[in-house]
Amino acid sequence: MTDRLIIFDTTLRDGEQSPGASMNRDEKVRIAKVLERMRVDVIEAGFPIASAGDFEAVKAVAEAVTESTVCALARATEKDIDRAAEAIRPASSGRIHTFIATSPIHMQEKLRMQPDEVVERAVWAVKRARQYTDDVEFSPEDAGRSEPDFLCRVLEAVIDAGAKTVNIPDTVGYNVPQQFGDLIASLIERVPNSDKAVFSVHCHNDLGLAVANSLSAVANGARQVECTINGLGERAGNASLEEIVMAVRTRQDIFACDTGIDTTQIVPASRLVSNITGFPVQPNKAIVGANAFAHESGIHQDGVIKKRETYEIMRAEDVGWSANRMVLGKHSGRHAFRARLAELGIEFESEEGLNSAFARFKDLADKKHEIFDEDLQALVTEEGLEQANESLKLVALKVCSQTGEIPLADVTVSVDGQERHSSAEGGGPVDAAFRAIEAVVQSGSQLQLYSVSNITSGTDSQGEVTVRLEKGGRIVNGHGADTDIVVASAKAYIHALSKLVAPAQKAHPQRGQAI
Ligand code: KIV
Ligand code: ZN
């Protein structure tokens, strides 16, 4: 009999800790609905104590999702745990994930606590969380650099206190596969009550080993993996969900377990996360990269035509790759529009929201004959940005660019409801537009990244632009989509600037933590 491998997705929590990847409530709900459709077992929706916005987002996910367990993160403090409990209260199935660091360096330098105090606090936190839900997970943060004997002591104590899942994080991505697998096997063997809890792993990718470490742990008895779509996450990211799920599915000869994931939802989820966060997926990324199933060399193409398995170990359609499928066109009505969005898991709270998105769809259909699912996703993201209460909005843009002439941009930006105008020359039309916008906003920020990709194929495709800005150590991403890439660029730039001028900085769960 094959065991179930629990998939715990933390795109909305650890993924969001990636600099510039913050998501608003509605964006989190959209991603959560896709994760639910993918049959992810547990969705970690956020860190409710971080800010009012984070609390509201976790609560909204808890209200919207019925099939997956919704989890909230909490440090081992009363305030954190109580806030997490309140946020997940509406969930059909809710989990509190509490943690405290157990490595010598974290205990001494960050927490300034003695090991005995850490054990006591961990037990207290699990008991407090159990007052709210039976489903409590505990993580000894930086387990990958903790003393194994001390880990055994902590784990035994928290399982006794009622933790149903114990998660072993390689917080700084320091471990290597053989060693990490051995650690998991020895913890399961040595902790006397290990049969009372599910052993989970949470690996970071600082050495590019997050997936390998997680799989080694699974081969050694771990039955939950914490991972993210596209491997998004703090620093170099977390283990990528799609790689874990497909490795386990493809190598059933090695793994004595399988997930309940509907793999056909993987590519749509990857696109949605990329679209919302503005983090592009590299073309050679396993499973979800544009080239993951493309065969360049003639020998490979010949082999694949004769027998697909000569060079393909997975089927593209099994992970949700399908040729861009035209779903709607210029003559499609409101009903068809609403129905297709519902199939994509997108629902509008009000008729006005739907009407406004439908008007945007009609505009797009005038410029582009065939509208694909990817266009609809981008359109809804754009609609969300438009509705967001942002202080900066693009009102108008005119750009002149011709051979032999210096490009010139005229821009009108609404700043807190007041229209301001400026013009600037630049090295190209995008540069001119950015200079004109900066002349209005005067942010003093530095452009760190500018990238353009096409949402679908064809020259009438919408261009999707990501802009990353930095100011005083704060990094924000903005994105925009339009059939005109200069307009898409201006929208992305203004979106990033809006985030930069907004005051809210939310608390980070693992940094500057005082217990
Ligand atoms: O990386 C880590 O240790 C974490 C914990 C909060 C589980 O994200
Ligand atoms: Zn982490």
Image (cartoon, helix red, strand yellow):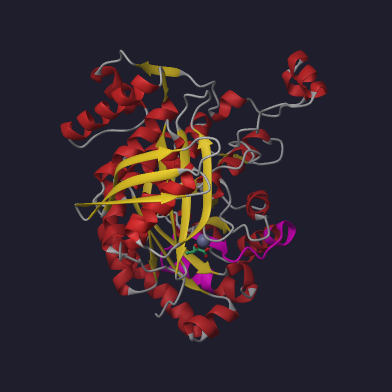
* Percent coordinates x, y for residue 238 in the rendering: 56, 54
- In this picture, is 369 found above or below 157? above
Q: Residue at x 54, y 85 (%)?
A: 108
Q: Foreground residue, 421 or 468?
A: 421
Left or right: 434 in relation to 107? left
In terms of image quadrants, where is residue 171?
bottom right
Residue 307 in magenta stretch:
no
Q: Residue at x 52, y 69 (%)?
A: 141
Q: Residue at x 39, y 33 (%)?
A: 377
In the rendered image, the quadrant that contains the N terminus is top right
Number of labelled discs?
0
Evaluate whether residue 277 shows in this view: no
Evaluate whether residue 446 shows in this view: yes
Residue that protrudes farthest toward the left in the picture: 351
Q: Foreground residue, 110 or 358?
A: 358
Left or right: 58 in relation to 166? left
* Percent coordinates x, y for residue 496 in the rendering: 39, 53
Q: Residue at x 41, y 21 (%)?
A: 368
In the rendered image, the quadrant that contains the C terminus is bottom left
Residue that protrudes farthest toward the front in the picture: 404
In terms of image quadrants, where is residue 79?
bottom left
Residue that protrudes farthest toward the right in the picture: 299
Q: Foreground residue, 69 or 306?
A: 306
Left or right: 423 in relation to 105? left
- In this picture, is 120 found above or below 497? below
Q: Foreground residue, 127 or 208?
A: 208
- In this picture, is 204 found above or below 7? below
Residue 178 in magenta stretch:
yes
Which contiguous range is marked in magenta? 154-180
- In this picture, is 390 found above or below 359? below
* Percent coordinates x, y for residue 265 in the rendering: 48, 32
* Percent coordinates x, y for residue 316 in the rendering: 61, 26
